[in-house]
Image: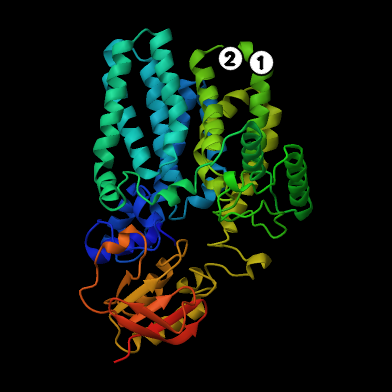
Amino acid sequence: MTYHMARVMHWVQNKSIDHYPSHVLRQHYQPPFTEYIILHLQILNGTDRWANLVQLFFFTNILLIVSLITKELGGNKQVQIVSIFLTATIPMAVLEANSTQNDLVNSCWVLASVYFLIRLLKDKETAIYLPIICTALSIGLAVFTKSISYIWLFPFCLGAGIYLVFVCRKFLRLTILIGTILTSILFLNAGHFYRNYKIYKHILGGTQEERQAYTNASHTLPKLLSNIIRNIALHLRTDFSYWNRLVRVVTLKIHQWLNLTIHEPSITYAGSGQLRSYDNWLAFDEDTAGNFFHFQLIVFTCILILVNLKKYSSIIFRYYLLACILGFLLFCIYLRWQEWHVRLHLPLFILFMPISAIMLYNREKIINFITPVFLIFSIFCLLFNTHKPVLPLKLNNYVTIWNQKRLNLYNNSATQLIELADYIVKDSTHRVGLILNADDGDYLYWVFLKNKSKSISINHINVTNPSGKIKCFNVIPQYIIASTDVGKSVTTEYGVYQKVKNIGFSHIYKLPK
């Protein structure tokens, strides 16, 4: 709601993918590959009904790539099937598979990059060019989908480089690989980098304050341990409030021992607050759901490998495992902790599934135990998805996709948004300006206003960040909607707008005639 779908609507309206004035900087600097696909579906269909198919499509591709990685790591057909099952039952993957997020799309390209890297390391000299090209394209598309790809792929690329130099002695192959990867990243991302640089004077976009808000301000061993513990704690939460409080108490005790607060400002994203006890935490929310059982499986897998280290002597197998672990450490070193990191962890969980499947081989009792547990919980995620519940749940006031109108499923404030749209459209309004906070989602306004009038245009005004210098309106907006109370009047370049009504969280201003 904040930037994925909102930016698509602006592109459709502007008939251009150029940047536009926006209070929400993420609508500009976040890599746009997934939204480009949604954009085409939006134009073809005229609605967002097909938007969720993008993640679902890439999820099916992930299952295929996971099986191929498992095969390259030494797994047979039975192990490949197990790896597919383990991946298909990851709660966050199931929940996101029918959403407009981009973590599954990103995971697909990350996995493809890793698979072709492995093929490159194993193939003979005469068969290197196809893996090199496929690796470079996959990495370029991963970066074009989500910036977190740099973190997950760096250890794999570093490991591949070390392997090629010190094991294979293939200096030329490494040179070609590096050059092709850099060319792919620049070629695929050149337009996005240029649009960012044109407005923000930085190819990654956003203001300096925005970029610093996500990265750790200081680096010490206690702070690294804090981030590791808190990121792990995200996957230890359940629907049992007693257990959640216990997790938080233990986390607090560890932080006391580290002489840190649990919400240390220098390593915590400002919008996250504290690691809450989550008495009312939802296990079926695509933004916060942890992968409790799969995390236990990963821990169990790592223990088995340590116990049987000599059995797994393959250099590539060890390199793969070490790259996964280093990726997580790099994640904790670089990024401030936030409670929505569970989504960003998704590629790492999927990368671990081939290893877990191999470790479960010939351990039928364990497989027979985890299969119903994983399957049942994944089905629950599918049926009781907080945002799209198929079956009624008391926690959701028994709301389902069957007993609610489609508009009502967008937001709990649907009734107020319908009232707002009726009020604005009644004057044959064709132009609306928005004044939002940096984390507000303007897509809700698009949905409800466009539902009443297809001809209405919506743009952000009074934008104070660098994108504010871009001009969009050819004519004066008739109404302004502000997500927070900005006073009895709003002064803009078009005149002074007077407040005429408050509806829910929206404040409506009109230019006097």
Q: Nearer the viewer, residue 160 or 497?
A: 497
User: Helix or strand or loop: what does disc 1 sit on?
Assistant: loop
Residue 239 visible, this orientation: yes
Is residue 68 or residue 508 the one in the foreground? 508
* Image quadrant assignment for residue 82: top right
Percent of width and height locating residue 97: 47, 50
Q: CA distance from mark 2 to mark 1?
A: 7 Å
Circle 2 SS class = loop
Please give the name of the residue rendered at 58% of the width and 28% of the height, measured from the top-left corner. 357
Q: Which mark is residue 76?
A: none
Identify residue type, mark 2: Tyr
- Mark 2 crowdedness (10 Å alpha carbons): few <14, some 14-19, many ≥20: some
Tell me if 296 is positioned left or right of 348 in this view.
right
Residue at the spot of label 1: 308
- For the C terminus, give its image quadrant: bottom left
The residue at the point 68 percent across, 34 percent down is: 368
**Residue 128 picture location, percent across and down:** 29, 17
Mark 2 and mark 1 in contact? Answer it, CB < 8 Å.
yes
In this picture, residue 420 sits left or right of residue 176: right
Q: Determine which residue is flagged by label 2.
A: 312
Q: Position of residue 397 (x, y in %)?
A: 64, 71
Q: Amino acid at mark 1?
A: Asn
Q: Is the residue marked by circle 1 packed among few (<14), some (14-19), or many (20+) residues within 10 Å?
A: few
